[in-house]
Amino acid sequence: MIRLLIADDEDMLRSALAALLELEDDLTVVAEASTSTDAVRLAREHRPDLAVLDLEMPPADGLHAAAEILAALPTRIILVTRHARPGVLRRALAAGVRGFVPKTTPAARLAEIIRDVAGGRRYVDPDIAASALTEDDCPLTERELEVLRACRTGASISEISAQVHLAPGTVRNYLSAAMAKLGVGSRHAAAHRAWEEGWI
Amino acid sequence: MIRLLIADDEDMLRSALAALLELEDDLTVVAEASTSTDAVRLAREHRPDLAVLDLEMPPADGLHAAAEILAALPTRIILVTRHARPGVLRRALAAGVRGFVPKTTPAARLAEIIRDVAGGRRYVDPDIAASALTEDDCPLTERELEVLRACRTGASISEISAQVHLAPGTVRNYLSAAMAKLGVGSRHAAAHRAWEEGWI
DNA sequence: CGGATCAGGTGACATCTGTCATCCGCCGCC
DNA sequence: GGCGGCGGATGACAGATGTCACCTGATCCG
């Protein structure tokens, strides 16, 4: 019997998956979490064989939760994401995640993937893997990503500079560089593009 | 036997819901759609008793699909949404939707709601209904919403003006008005806020 | 040691943006 | 007809933003 933890902030999907997986003879759901902190806590508590984590989860994303769980337990981890991009896949694999599944995957297929990963194999969605091999990697530096992240809410230069503890002029330079790399004309367009690509 | 159409662009959730609802003795899923256009087409084709539509669905949102279906068929409609805000609820009810369910609702509860609505009753999530009665309504005009929608991708004034077929100066006026109403200092912050509130 | 490189910062300049007062044409209405 | 309200547009102005050249310390390496 494979013991599962399921974490997704969307109750409807999480409960539906839990119910469906519970119907399988060899799977059982021992814990459900709706936040990344709960996911880590419940993983320590229940020590599941495998954790299915949503990537987009407050307060920290699923990748952070995955890293914390992997640091403490031998649990295998499958990341599920709505917005699957090659950049995210790279980071996930680097963190030691064993399965990477976009939410375009039918629920029925998930049970098979869980068995595969629990059995020691890895699973990466073929479409995303192909993209990751052909598409360009993220051209932005860590600093550039940081300022772009800070400007997603529509913040002004001075607000961004306060958030990242840099001089306003420096922030403008980083943003200017990022805009040039992404081929757009404003920091907001740059932030939007970077988000679309899964880089922030 | 209640015949259902299920439409959601997220395959994982749609397939999971379809599988779970199909397990109920009195429910059967006669069609699944992943786009709003498919939803309308399949509704005409299969004439389901009830359609469960996701609100966030390309190319037009679920509300448009709901309106089209309601204009052509006696089908009852339940809207499901990830980002449930009072403003959206108002628009949905005005369009003739009979059920309004956020994705924070557990999947098991959905079957009961479907029976209720199929039986002629209405269902509105209590939390959202309460918010809708207490919270302020959207203070923005249709035009203001339009320009804010167009600037969500980080577009410049001239790009927005091209998209909405207005003079650049007029666009600036609308944006200025929207920013004043929302109490923010840039159009991007205004767009972000309006999105958070579920107004665009 | 001396140069190369790089993160961070500064200042000047051209544009873009946001604000505001104002104007025009259209519609409804007393 | 006259009048006001309204959607749309214009123009002037201040401040924010993007660009670019260049400076300052670290740090690394031959």
Image (spheres, coloured by chain):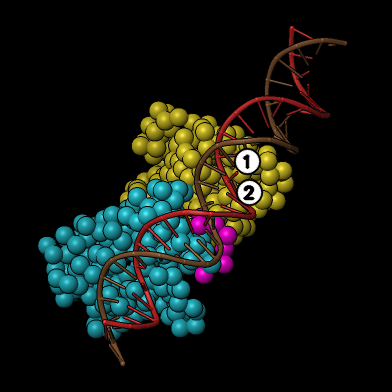
Chain colours: A yellow, B cyan, C brown, D red
The disc placed on residue B131 is none
User: Which chain does the residue under circle 2 lie in?
Assistant: A
Mark 1: give few (<14), some (14-19) or many (20+) Cα within 10 Å: some
Callout 2: helix, strand or loop?
helix
Q: Amino acid at mark 2?
A: Ile
- The image position of residue C5, as x and y in percent, is 68, 20
Q: Is residue A63 magenta?
A: no
Question: Eyeballing the image, is A183 above or below A82?
Answer: above
User: Which chain does the residue under circle 1 lie in?
Assistant: A
Callout 1: helix, strand or loop?
helix
- Give the extent of the magenta segment: B181-188
Residues at badges 2 and 1 in contact (C-beta under 8 Å)?
Answer: yes
Q: Closest to the observer: B186 or C1? A: B186
- The image position of residue B107, as x and y in percent, is 38, 67
Q: Residue at x 41, y 48 (%)?
A: B158
Label located before the other in sequence (2 or 1) = 2
Which corner quadrant of the image does residue B3 belong to? Answer: bottom left
Mark 2: give few (<14), some (14-19) or many (20+) Cα within 10 Å: many
Query: Is B106 positioned to the left or the right of B188 in the image?
Result: left
Q: Closest to the observer: A115 or A199? A: A199
Q: Residue at x 34, y 52 (%)?
A: B163
Q: Which residue is mark 2?
A: A157
Residue A180 visible here: yes
Mark 2 and mark 1 on one chain? yes
The disc placed on residue A172 is 1
- The image position of residue B170, as x and y in percent, is 41, 59
Spatial separation of the CA atoms under disc 2 and disc 1 = 7 Å
Query: Is A46 positioned to the left or the right of B60 in the image?
Result: right
- The image position of residue D27, as x and y in percent, is 78, 25
Q: Amino acid at mark 1?
A: Arg
Question: Eyeballing the image, is B177 above or below A172?
Answer: below
